[in-house]
Amino acid sequence: MSESIQCQATRRGRAWVAHIPEHGVYGYGRTLKAVRESIEAGLAHVGVTAEVTVIAVTPELKNLRSAKDAYTAALREAVVALALRSTTRRDIALATEVPTKRVKALLAERSAPPANLDPAAELPAPNLSPDLRPDTKDQR
C-alpha cells in the first residue's frame, strides 16, 4: 500500500458512514472495521490502493478528545514545573501517576531542538520593550 488515507465516520442510525471526497468513495458498516473494509473496497474500484484509517466522530467523542488534550497539556505543565524544581523523574512519575517513560518523553519534548535549523533562514525579530529599542531619533 503506497498511500495512507484518513476518513471520518459518523453514526447514522445503527451504522457508521464515511466519505472520501477526493476519490468520490463512500463506505458504511455496522462496525468501524466494516467501514474501513468498505472504503478500501471502494478505493480499489477506482484504482487506489491505500491503507485507510477511520476516525469515529460524534459530539461525545469530540468532548472526550478535548478533555484528553487538556489533560495532556496539564500533565506536561506539571512535569515541567516539577523538573524545574529538581524533582527526580521517578518522583515526578509517582506524583503525576504516569509511567517514568512518559515523564522522560514529556521532558524530551521540552528540550527538543527548534524545528527550523536552516542557518540561512530568517530569525524572528526580537520583541523589545520601548526602553530597550535602539534610539532612532536624530542626535543633536
Image (cartoon, grey):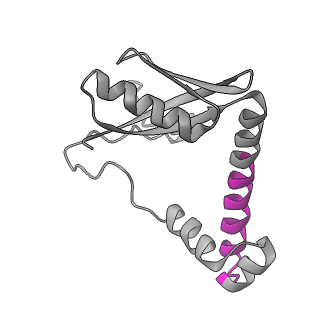
Taken as a whole, is the magenta stretch helix, strand or loop?
helix
Left or right: where 24 falls relative to 29? left
Q: Is residue 83 shown in magenta?
A: yes
Left or right: where 2 falls relative to 41? left
Looking at the rendered image, the quarter that the N terminus falls into is top left
Which residue is depicted at the point 55% across and 41% down? 33
Q: Which of the 4 image quarters holds residue 125?
A: top left
Question: Which percent across, then down, holds residue 105?
Answer: 54, 69
Front-most of residues 124 and 55: 55
Looking at the rendered image, the quarter that the C terminus falls into is top left
Determine whether 58 is above or below 103 in the image.
above
Question: Which percent across, then down, holds residue 71?
Answer: 75, 53
Q: Which of the 4 image quarters holds residue 3?
A: top left
How many marks can you see? 0
Question: Which percent across, then down, holds residue 64?
Answer: 76, 41
Which residue is depicted at the point 53% across and 37% down? 54
Determine whether 124 is above or below 29 in the image.
below
Q: Is residue 1 shown in magenta?
A: no
The magenta region covers 70-89
Left or right: where 11 falls relative to 29? right
> Does the image show residue 134?
yes
Which residue is depicted at the point 77% across and 80% down? 94
